[in-house]
């Protein structure tokens, strides 16, 4: 009886504290009313002193102001949240959530080496890498090997912008490494980034363990926008993410990336590494992370190069997260790029090398007279975190060639020219467990196709409309799913992005919503069959992962990087 009374009291207290307010995110509602929490408060306008005072009067303390999301990060008593949410000037309140971080064959596969031979190397373009920091390495210096191309560094966590984790340096090498320490007559393989002469803006938000928070990422995005003109920042790379907790229209991370996009900066985001997650019976569908779920940004999934220079034998990495996005049903990823077992720069004395020494490569792998000892310059990682910088570099090449391109035009060209030649299905084996994973090549797995840099550089289309990723809409009457553009047009029934269709000579998603010779949805069980386990979670309004899910990060991708 006492136990029952305690539970009843707790339920009544929770009800009184929150009152079901739709302005308070669900993951704030299990907090103890007596606690103080770090939150992000979004207002209906850029907050003024009047708004700051309202929060202060509720016992809140401002940590950092965010013009990009019309709000700020605050420390607030839990029992004041309901009263604050009742204010008509307050739009939404969320926790300051945790985020984590989600080349020898890769460049040839997507045509970056050909682009470089014609002089397209990202020269003069600034790419903001919002990650765990960037180490000062030879491969990131200028063509005279004198000055660093990391032209600006700032930390939002810790005391140094140096990379103690190792993730950001690896990403930076994929984006803009020039291969200085692997190029020449004494080397057999050169590890060159996609845009080897681009400038890098190092904005550190992840700590030595690869973890950060929403507020740190938003602060970095805001800083990138402020520095846009100073360093010609045209691209932001976000190889990080966390689970989706609400619609992208309310998520502060999504609002921040949209602000950058509207400021003229291409935002490229890793899709996430949850494609093998079948805990909800969805076969890995609807596992895209935030802010990759935002319809403005370019969301990138991971391919396996199969250690060949041709893309014809490449296959999807089974861990690459798949759409549609939970809650909003946005079609993601937008395209795919090499991301499995990529070799790039190693940050000295970083956590990743100490935690995962098996990811080291032997010096003999790329040096003619090299020994079998581990390289202290290069390292191998896998994940959509590695695929995203491939696309960020490609965007820089397009912007070097045609600086007047808008983010929408860059996205449209990359998606339209992406290679669409895929098998129907493929099977991957986890070498650690022997478990098999079957992947289908539908739009929620590979998006618009496989990055093709040469084709994108040769394209001259100028998108006259916003390149917003479409939405998938399920019709329970016909048990069919159609694609709807952000402006309400059904993709496939209307022309979009100029005089040509995104898919070339056919309708937008092929011929009458057919992908090649198979249905756009493949034969997956979760499309159109409401009796399957995962159907209600994908097409309903619930969350798919619960509260204890692993966030998108390299811990996941490293564990499965030996995928066959």
Image (cartoon, grey):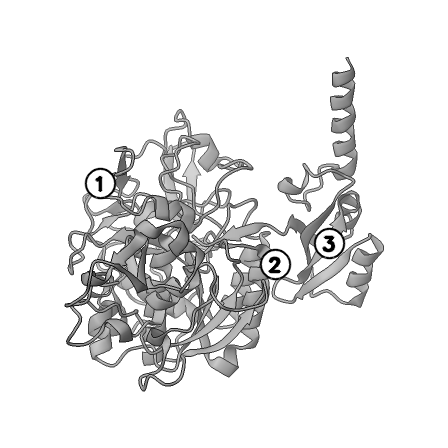
Left or right of 55, for residue 459: left
Q: Which residue is mark 3?
A: 75
Secondary element under disc 2, as helix, strand or loop, is helix
Q: Is residue 80 above or below residue 228?
A: above
Left or right of 459, for residue 40: right
Q: CA distance from mark 2 to mark 3?
A: 12 Å
Q: Nearer the viewer, mark 2 or mark 1?
A: 2
Give 364 or 7, whichever is nearer the viewer.
364
Q: Which residue is mark 1?
A: 425
Residue 440 is at least partly visible in this image: yes
Q: Which residue is mark 2?
A: 215
Give 106 or 538, whichever is nearer the viewer.
106
Label 2, residues with CA under 10 Å away: few <14, some 14-19, many ≥20 = many
Q: x and y percent of residue 340 in the render? A: 29, 52
Which quadrant would the N terminus be assigned to in this image? top right
Badge 1 vs badge 3, beta-carbon distance below 8 Å = no
Q: Is residue 537 above or below residue 366?
A: above
Whichever of labels 2 and 3 marks the residue nearer the N terminus, that label is 3
Secondary element under disc 1, as helix, strand or loop, is strand
Label 3, residues with CA under 10 Å away: few <14, some 14-19, many ≥20 = some
Badge 2 vs badge 1, beta-carbon distance below 8 Å = no
Q: Is residue 464 above or below residue 300?
A: below
Secondary element under disc 3, as helix, strand or loop, is strand
Tell me the tag on residue 396: none
Residue at screen point 48% across, 42% down: 550
Q: Is residue 149 above or below residue 192?
A: below
Whichever of labels 2 and 1 marks the residue nearer the N terminus, that label is 2
Q: x and y percent of residue 109 in the render? A: 20, 61
């Amino acid at each position: 009886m006492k136990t029952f009374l305690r539970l009843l009291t707790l339920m009544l207290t929770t009800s009184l504290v929150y009152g079901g307010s739709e302005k308070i995110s669900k993951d704030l509602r299990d907090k103890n009313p007596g606690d103080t929490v770090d939150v992000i408060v979004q207002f209906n306008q850029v907050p003024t002193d009047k708004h700051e005072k309202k929060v202060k009067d509720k016992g809140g303390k401002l940590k950092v102001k965010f013009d990009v999301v019309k709000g700020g990060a605050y420390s607030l008593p839990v029992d004041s949240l309901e009263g604050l949410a009742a204010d008509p000037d307050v739009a939404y309140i969320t926790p300051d959530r945790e985020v984590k971080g989600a080349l020898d064959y890769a460049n040839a596969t997507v045509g970056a080496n050909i682009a470089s031979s014609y002089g397209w190397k990202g020269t003069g373009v600034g790419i903001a890498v919002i990650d765990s920091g960037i180490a000062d390495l030879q491969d990131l210096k200028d063509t005279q090997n004198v000055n660093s191309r990391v032209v600006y560094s700032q930390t939002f966590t810790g005391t140094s912008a140096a990379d103690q984790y190792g993730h950001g340096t690896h990403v930076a090498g994929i984006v803009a490494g020039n291969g200085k320490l692997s190029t020449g007559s004494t080397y057999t393989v050169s590890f060159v980034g996609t845009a080897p002469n681009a400038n890098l803006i190092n904005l550190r938000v992840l700590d030595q363990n690869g973890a950060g928070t929403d507020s740190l990422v938003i602060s970095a995005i805001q800083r990138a926008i402020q520095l846009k003109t100073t360093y010609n920042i045209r691209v932001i790379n976000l190889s990080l993410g966390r689970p989706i907790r609400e619609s992208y229209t309310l998520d502060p991370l999504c609002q921040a990336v949209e602000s950058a996009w509207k400021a003229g900066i291409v935002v490229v985001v890793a899709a996430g590494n949850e494609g093998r997650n079948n805990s909800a019976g969805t076969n890995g569908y609807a596992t895209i992370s935030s802010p990759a779920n935002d319809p403005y940004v370019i969301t990138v999934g991971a391919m396996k190069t199969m250690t060949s220079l041709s893309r014809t034998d490449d296959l999807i990495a089974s861990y690459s997260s798949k759409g549609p996005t939970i809650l909003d049903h946005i079609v993601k990823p937008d395209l795919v790029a090499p991301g499995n077992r990529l070799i790039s720069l190693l940050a000295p004395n970083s956590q990743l090398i100490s935690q995962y020494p098996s990811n080291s490569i032997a010096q003999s792998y790329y040096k003619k007279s090299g020994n079998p000892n581990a390289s202290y310059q290069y390292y191998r990682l896998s994940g959509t975190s590695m695929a995203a910088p491939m696309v960020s570099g490609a965007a820089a090449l397009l912007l070097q060639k045609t600086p007047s391109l808008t983010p929408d035009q860059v996205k449209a060209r990359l998606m339209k020219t992406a290679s669409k030649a895929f098998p129907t299905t493929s099977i991957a084996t986890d070498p650690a467990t022997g478990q098999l994973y079957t992947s289908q090549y539908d739009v929620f797995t590979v998006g618009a196709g496989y990055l093709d840099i040469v084709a994108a550089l040769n394209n001259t289309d100028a998108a006259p409309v916003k390149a917003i990723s479409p939405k998938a809409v399920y019709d329970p009457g016909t048990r069919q799913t159609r694609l709807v553009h952000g402006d309400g047009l059904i993709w496939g029934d209307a022309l979009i992005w100029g005089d040509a269709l995104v898919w070339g000579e056919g309708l937008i998603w092929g011929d009458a919503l057919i992908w090649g010779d198979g249905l756009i949805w493949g034969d997956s069980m979760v499309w159109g069959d409401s009796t399957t386990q995962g159907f209600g979670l994908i097409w309903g309004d619930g969350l798919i992962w619960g509260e204890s899910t692993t966030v998108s990060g390299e811990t996941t991708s490293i564990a499965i990087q030996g995928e066959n």
